[in-house]
Image (cartoon, grey):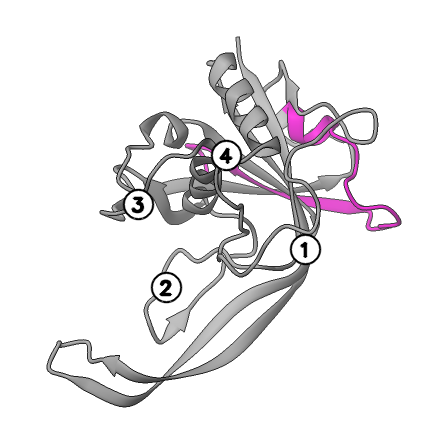
Amino acid sequence: MVWTLRMRFAGPMQSWGTRSRFDIRDSEIAPSKSGVVGLVAAALGRGRSERVDDLAALRLGVRLDREGVPMRDYHTAQNVIKADGSGLQETALSERHFIADATFLVGLEGTDRELLTQIDAALEQPRWPLALGRRSFPPSKPVYLRPPVDPEPLVEASLEEALVTCPHLVDGDSRPDVRYLVEDDRGEQLWFDQPISNFVDRTFVMRKVRMAVAPWGESWS
């Protein structure tokens, strides 16, 4: 038996980096696995040194209800330690990429209904503040879904079915098609964002992601 927890990631700014270095902070077009696991761990109150194996084992899928606009900030910082540790550099320059005005339907699939129920409850009353990729990027709407205003959050369905059958999260969007990014061994994309330890060690490996485009409400799997 498979269950999928559905969540809403909506905010004026989101950033989901998978290849960031100090001078260039990238952002993918949709939430990353490391970012979603980090948000869930914060809601549950897990410290950065605690393992997240059970969360990382959940399968991730995203429906891009409103894809948002790619943006970039230009930052300067003073008295930054040099990469070789030899001292301070007077001025360091960096680019911070983010997505503006995006809304994503995010799904986590697993067989442990109790774990998914705990996550859902924690999203409503998080131990620590939730952020959409960066601490300065809070959600503009609740991450958790609650009927009758919202769709059901936890459904007995595969990840693909749960994403397809969920009503649109953005009113007034007239696009004929919607894009999906789903964790899948048949995926053609490689994302370097699968956590394998904790967020102190920051150890990640590749995972395969499948992208699909389909009319609203129609299956693509």
Q: Position of residue 27 (x, y in %)?
A: 49, 61
**Residue behind mark 2:** 20
203 or 45, nearer to the observer: 45
- Residue at image point 28% right, 40% down: 198
- Residue at image point 56% right, 17% down: 3
Above-or-below relation of 137 to 205: below
Q: Secondary structure at mark 1?
A: strand
What residue span does the magenta drawing correspond to? 161-187
The reply to whether discs 3 and 2 touch (Cβ–Cβ < 8 Å) is: no
Q: Residue furthest left?
A: 86
Real-space CA distance between mark 2 and mark 1, rounded to the nearest whole angstrom: 21 Å
Tell me: 191 left or right of 9.
left
- Was residue 166 drawn as part of the magenta stretch in this picture? yes
Real-space CA distance between mark 3 and mark 2, rounded to the nearest whole angstrom: 15 Å
70 or 191, nearer to the observer: 70
**Residue behind mark 4:** 60
Graded by Cα atoms within 10 Å as few (under 14), some (14 to 19) or many (20 or more), the crowding at tag 1 reads many
Comparing labels 3 and 2, the label whose residue is closer to the camera: 3
Q: Position of residue 194 (x, y in %)?
A: 35, 41
**Residue behind mark 3:** 199
Q: Secondary structure at mark 3?
A: loop
Ranked by sequence position, the earlier of labels 3 and 4 is 4
- Which numbered dot is residue 115? none
